[in-house]
Image (cartoon, rainbow, N blue to C red):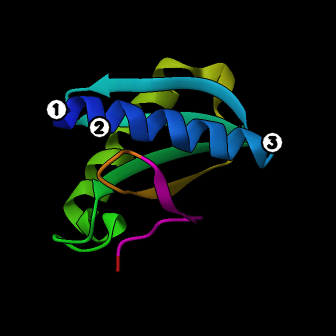
Amino acid sequence: MSSVSLGKLGENIALKHLKKKGYRFVDRNFRSKFGEIDLILRDKKTLVFVEVKTRRGLKYGPPLDSIQPYKIRHIIKTVQYFLLKNPRLNCSYRLDAVGILLDHNDNVLHIRHVNNLTID
């Protein structure tokens, strides 16, 4: 499976997980020249922009360890662009991350959801 296919699988798993928690789907794979937002959802009245990281095994560390400050800055710029293009959705928002760990048969071993991702 390619890294693109693995990413799509992870996004589908994350979307299903977040919907079970009551989030409502808005959009996915929104792109700008700054980057891409994997999932856009609503948590009550808050727009939630979600970065999804999926890995098989821990050879390179936990999935969320790969989200570095430069990546967060690119996501924030993409969020700003999204809100500019969608003024009717301009409301409170936050940036979340979902890390998904799979075994080598693509069974989910662990899902970690982090609210309010920030730059340290």
Q: Residues within 10 Å of mark 2 (few under 14, many from 20)?
A: some
Residue name at image x 24 percent, y 74 percent: 61
The answer to whether marks 2 and 3 mark residues whose Cβ atoms lie closer than 8 Å is no
Residue 45 is tagged as: 3
Q: Position of residue 49 (x, y in %)?
A: 52, 43
Residue 87 is tagged as: none
- Farthest residue to the front: give it: 105
Camera-side residue: 23 or 82? 23
Residue name at image x 51 percent, y 54 percent: 95
Residue that carries the numbered disc 2 in the rendered image: 6
Q: Hey, what amino acid is under mark 3?
A: Lys
Camera-side residue: 14 or 40? 14
The answer to whether marks 2 and 1 mark residues whose Cβ atoms lie closer than 8 Å is yes
Q: Position of residue 103 (x, y in %)?
A: 35, 56
Residue 96, above or below 34:
below
Q: Earlier in the sequence, mark 3 or mark 1?
A: 1
Asked where in the image residue 55 lies, by quadrant, the reply is bottom left
Image quadrant holding the C terminus, namely: bottom left
